[in-house]
Amino acid sequence: MDDNRLNGRVALVTGSRRGIGRAIALSFASAGANLILCDNVTDDGKLEETASDIKKMGRTVVTIVADVSRKSDIDEMAARATARFGKIDILVNCAGVWIPGQNLIDTPENNWDKVIDTNLKGTYLCSQIIGRIMLKQRKGNVINIASKVGLEGGLGAGAYPISKAGIVMMTRQMAQELAPNGIRVNALAPGIVKTDFTKDIWGTPDAAKQLAHSMPLGRLAEPEDIARAALFLASDDSSYVTGAVLLIDGAQTLPPLEKKQGN
């Protein structure tokens, strides 16, 4: 992905210390972008590790600790980012949480609040605050991370599908509102991706094998699969794409082809 498609651009990626967020940040850096990395966890050293890997590519990188559900944190993040770079060309809303093992009827209020506040409200706050910067620039690019379950639901996922469905509609709404100002807004809707985030699902060899076998492509998605799609949306290759929700699930949601009996 080292092709300089994003040369000179500044990208802010939330939830970028690991998994999909880290892969997206690295792919953007390899394509020429400078990065603002945001996460609310720093004690495991992974945020700084991601920053170090980006610096090795010769890019400028800033790390910011922020809770995306807190407006004050996002205001400070935006101020620091613009003070350092003077602009923000790309925003990737990747920060998210899920609390597995519960149906909605059994989901406690505090679990609902945590998921909705981080995933949906966090995406809203970041898009609103960074979007105002992009409005002044009269250009910008927002990429939201939705989910396959935001399009069709998922058993035992609690409030998570609701939060991701909200992100889908937010993407479409903001795309219409911001298009006249040269700002594009799109979303990616991954299926199961092999990250720590979903390790409860695929983390044993038997589970991973069974899931891979259920995919028409015969494998689970890697974070880099999502990052390549994000790079497309972030670049001028997708300059006429806005309001789109790109499903990345290896054809898992497609109905299986019927086997026809021979004559």
Image: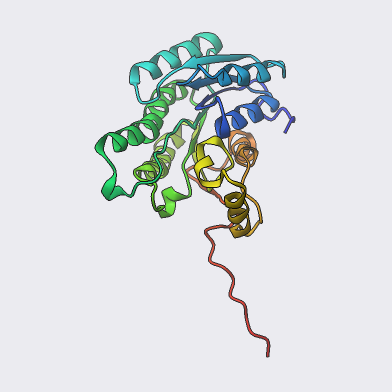
Number of numbered tags placed on the structure image: 0
Q: Position of residue 172 (x, y in %)?
A: 42, 43
Q: Position of residue 227 (x, y in %)?
A: 62, 36
Q: Residue at x 57, y 33 (%)?
A: 19
Q: Compare residues 18 and 6 and report the one nearer the observer.
A: 18
Which residue is at the far bottom?
Answer: 263
Image quadrant where one finds the C terminus: bottom right
Vertical arrangement, residue 104 with respect to residue 66, above or below: below
Residue 73 occupies quadrant: top left
Q: Position of residue 200 (x, y in %)?
A: 50, 42
Q: Residue at x 72, y 33 (%)?
A: 1
Q: How is the image coloured?
A: rainbow
Q: Is residue 98 left or right of residue 111?
A: right
Q: Is residue 207 left or right of residue 109?
A: right
Q: Position of residue 137 (x, y in %)?
A: 49, 21
Vertical arrangement, residue 90 with respect to residue 60, above or below: below
Q: Residue at x 65, y 52 (%)?
A: 219
Q: Is residue 73 left or right of residue 10?
A: left
Q: Residue at x 63, y 60 (%)?
A: 216
Which residue is at the far top?
Answer: 83
Residue 262 occupies quadrant: bottom right
Vertical arrangement, residue 2 with respect to residue 189, above or below: above
Vertical arrangement, residue 249 with respect to residue 66, above or below: below
